Image (cartoon, grey):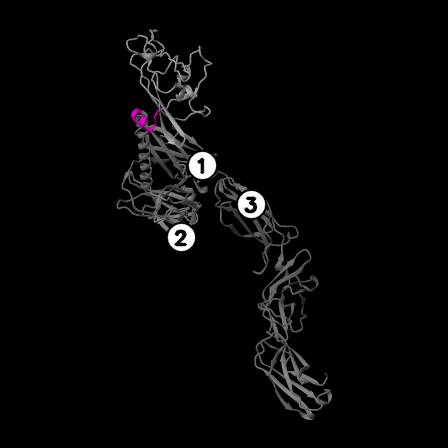
């Protein structure tokens, strides 16, 4: 509004220090505030802070503010007055806080010989939170002084880094070559100035030279472990006296070997102590020999490879063997293994190995029983052979033979063998020392797999007979089981081996076994599973856990010993569905298998057997009754009586051919119709008589025929009964009413075979027409 003025003690203060401010209000310049009381308040950014207010000279209102600790790196302080119920901002002051500049560190400079510009680098230090100017300064120093300082009137030149970087380049025109110069970095802000350490250098001392050139490398003819290396200075540095370093290493060396103190402009450097038949990589770098310790080295030269001369292998070979009788026992089968010599003993590339039965003598080579490029050999020797000789050879010659004594393995075994992980790919083996003195120990280890195998290199010799620990590192893989064997080597005999198993690292099994249902009943279920292959175990199986649950109960579990492969779940409910799974566990975790669904039965096995036995007995009883009914005719006749079929009866042949048209008269006035037959009784024929076979005889009086009779069944419905002879009737004549006619009985059943007249026949009292069977015909 132009009626207020704000003043502060200092607009830039150290971070955390006190800040004072004052706000003065002139009433006559603030429209609307001429009348009434003026209320002044303060705001730091948007936060209200309290100050004190007093009456100033000339009718002004003054408010003072003190902030004991200013913890903002940058903030705005507002002076406000109340007008119409609101706070109006009438004045402002900006305050910044920070630290003095930090001291620049690690100043270093390099002179580029291509343009002779001096490039310097440094580290800026911590942030001051304030605008800071950084300048690289340099000035000439007085010559020939131990502690050089610039003169009072010496001009200071330098360069300013751009873009906030911590490096810049001093051009050639500002440098004094081959003279001492003082170089430092200055950092300045509102709270102070800081300078780096001052360098007193000749710019040529820090010149970055190009690397030298390696010309040739060769072995010194009569000292084959020494080499001579010819080198030359880089272009543009021929006039300088150089100080150089040479470094080299073989491919298997962990670090470079360094050769220092090579002085000159060019020449030949010699070095001894190289291994025979070994390839080395050489590099070289240089700087001015008169340079200070701050001078920069050139880059390493391009590498150059060289292989030293070979000579015959030296030293003894570590060997181990196994022997057993072959065939009838006249020969001995030997499996010999050995370790390849190290590079220092091989003296070049080993071309092969030779095994003989006797050592090599001057002028005569013994017969070779094995010549191979491998580190193992199997051969047969005569029984009783106790020594063989092993040697290695390369292009330069053959080593001295190593005597291998085939000792018997009958010595005292060790005690307390155990193995623990030594790392992801190593195992520590511990054992107790025996009472008898031991020359050395032989360790063997084999990877345990489902398919049996043999590792020819998985063994090592511990030459310290007093040792009780050994570290196995060759061929050890995590999550694989290893069988470890330890043989003590005594004087003249080999001890019986002891064995243990170990893992270098364990984890949960790759898979869990698959469950199979072996037996189930109404309250039990027997489960079985196949043990996991050792490749899938990933550790020692500590336990199997069986989990089961139905749809309404919580899950139950049981822990099973890892040596078992079956388990019986008890206490199940009948006719209930359960889900079961198995978890295989090691010390590092467990793995769940797939779920198996099973349903318990309604009855137990004994109940099912009793039920089937009962049903079987019932079935057998029914079959027995059925057979009895089939075999017993009397019982069959009582239950199922035989009733003749009227349609197939022989009564149809009774009517003679001479009187076929003779009418049949019935006494009853009703129309003739079928009459129901209630009972038919068959009479047995005479013994020895065959129907139709008898000879004709004179007519005789017919026998007395059975009389038909009628039994009243209901009102007006007579049911007729009749008796029929067992042999039937033949040649009967139906007689009309009222005078019945005679008929001839061809069966000849009469008295003495004679014939008779009508009076001898004894006719029925009722007419034949009322005979039910005849009426049906």
Find out whether the residues at labels 1 and 3 contact each other: C-beta distance under 8 Å: no
In primary-sequence order, the first of circles 2 and 1 is 1
Q: Residues within 10 Å of mark 2 (few under 14, many from 20)?
A: few
Residue at 68% across, 82% down: 88
Q: Is residue 361 visible?
A: no
Q: Which residues are magenta?
A: 631-642
Question: Which residue is under mark 2?
Answer: 555
Q: Which mark is residue 2?
A: none
637 in magenta: yes
Q: Secondary structure at mark 2?
A: loop
Q: Residues within 10 Å of mark 1 (few under 14, many from 20)?
A: many
Find out whether the residues at labels 3 and 2 contact each other: C-beta distance under 8 Å: no
Q: Nearer the viewer, residue 704 or 146?
A: 704
Q: Secondary structure at mark 1?
A: loop
Q: Position of residue 164 (x, y in %)?
A: 65, 65
**SS assignment for the magenta stretch, majority:** helix
Question: Which residue is under mark 1?
Answer: 312
């Amino acid at each position: 509004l132009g009626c207020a003025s704000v003043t502060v003690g200092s607009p830039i203060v150290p971070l955390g220090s006190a800040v004072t401010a004052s706000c003065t209000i002139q009433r006559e310049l603030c429209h609307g505030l001429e009348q009434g009381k003026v209320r002044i308040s303060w705001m730091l950014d948007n936060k209200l802070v309290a100050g004190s207010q007093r009456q100033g000279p000339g009718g002004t209102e003054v408010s003072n503010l003190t902030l004991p600790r200013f913890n903002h790196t940058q903030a705005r302080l507002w002076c406000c007055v109340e007008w119409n119920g609101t706070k109006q901002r009438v004045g402002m002051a900006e305050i910044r806080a920070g630290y003095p500049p930090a001291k620049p560190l690690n100043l270093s400079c390099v002179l580029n010989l291509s343009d002779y510009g001096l490039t310097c680098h440094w580290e800026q230090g911590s942030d001051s939170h304030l605008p800071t100017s950084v300048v690289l300064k340099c000035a000439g120093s007085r010559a020939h002084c131990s502690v050089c300082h610039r003169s009072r009137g010496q001009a200071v030149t330098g360069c300013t880094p751009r873009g906030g970087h911590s490096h810049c380049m001093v051009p050639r025109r500002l440098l004094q070559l081959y003279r001492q110069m003082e170089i430092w970095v200055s950092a300045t802000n509102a709270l102070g100035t800081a300078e780096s350490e001052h360098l007193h250098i000749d710019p040529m001392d820090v010149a970055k030279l190009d690397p030298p050139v390696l010309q040739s490398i060769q072995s010194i003819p009569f000292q084959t472990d020494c080499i001579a290396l010819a080198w030359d200075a880089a272009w543009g540095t021929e006039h300088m006296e150089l100080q150089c370093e040479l470094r080299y290493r073989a491919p298997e060396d962990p670090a470079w070997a360094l050769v220092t103190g090579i002085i000159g402009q060019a020449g030949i450097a010699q070095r001894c102590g190289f291994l025979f038949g070994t390839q080395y990589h050489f590099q070289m770098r240089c700087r001015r020999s008169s340079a200070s310790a701050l001078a920069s080295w050139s880059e390493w030269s391009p590498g150059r490879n060289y292989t030293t001369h070979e000579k015959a292998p030296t030293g003894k070979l570590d060997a181990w063997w196994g022997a057993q009788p072959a065939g009838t026992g006249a020969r001995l089968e030997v499996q010999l293994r050995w370790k390849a010599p190290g590079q220092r003993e091989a003296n070049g590339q080993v071309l092969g190995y030779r095994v003989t039965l006797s050592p090599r003598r001057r002028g005569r080579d013994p017969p070779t029983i094995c010549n191979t490029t491998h580190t193992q050999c199997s051969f047969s020797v005569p029984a009783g052979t106790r020594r063989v000789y092993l040697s290695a050879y390369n292009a330069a010659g053959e080593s001295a033979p190593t005597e291998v004594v085939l000792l018997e393995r009958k010595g005292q075994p060790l005690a307390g063998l155990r193995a623990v992980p030594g790392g992801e790919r190593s195992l520590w083996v511990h054992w107790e020392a025996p009472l008898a003195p031991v020359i050395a120990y032989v360790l063997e280890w084999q990877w345990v797999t489902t398919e049996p195998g043999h590792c020819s290199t998985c063994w090592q010799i511990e030459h310290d007979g007093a040792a009780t620990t050994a570290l196995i590192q060759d061929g050890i893989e995590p999550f694989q089981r290893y069988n470890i064997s330890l043989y003590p080597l005594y004087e003249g005999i080999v001890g019986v081996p002891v064995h243990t198993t170990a893992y270098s690292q364990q984890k949960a099994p790759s898979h869990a076994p698959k469950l199979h249902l072996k037996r189930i009943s109404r309250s039990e279920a027997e489960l079985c599973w196949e043990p996991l292959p050792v490749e899938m175990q990933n550790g020692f199986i500590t336990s199997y856990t069986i989990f089961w649950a139905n749809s309404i109960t919580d899950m139950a579990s049981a822990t099973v010993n890892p040596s078992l492969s079956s388990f019986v779940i008890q206490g199940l409910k009948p006719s209930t569905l359960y889900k079961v799974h198995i978890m295989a566990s090691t010390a590092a975790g467990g793995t769940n298998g797939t779920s198996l669904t099973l349903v318990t039965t309604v009855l137990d096995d004994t109940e099912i057997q009793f039920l089937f036995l009962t049903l079987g007995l019932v079935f057998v009883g029914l079959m027995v009754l059925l057979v009895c009914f089939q075999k017993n005719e009397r019982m069959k006749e009582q239950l199922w009586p035989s009733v003749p079929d009227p349609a197939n009866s022989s009564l149809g042949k009774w009517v003679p051919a001479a009187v076929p048209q003779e009418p049949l008269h019935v006494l009853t006035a009703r129309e003739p119709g079928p009459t129901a037959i209630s009972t038919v009784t068959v009479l047995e024929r005479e013994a020895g008589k065959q129907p139709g076979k008898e000879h004709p005889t004179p007519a005789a009086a017919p026998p007395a025929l059975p009389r038909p009779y009628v039994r009243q069944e209901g009102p007006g419905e007579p049911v007729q009964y009749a008796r029929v002879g067992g042999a039937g009737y033949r040649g009967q004549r139906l007689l009309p009413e009222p005078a019945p006619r005679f008929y001839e009985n061809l069966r000849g059943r009469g008295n003495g075979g004679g014939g008779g007249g009508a009076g001898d026949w004894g006719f029925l009292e009722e007419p034949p027409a009322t005979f039910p069977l005849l009426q049906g015909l």
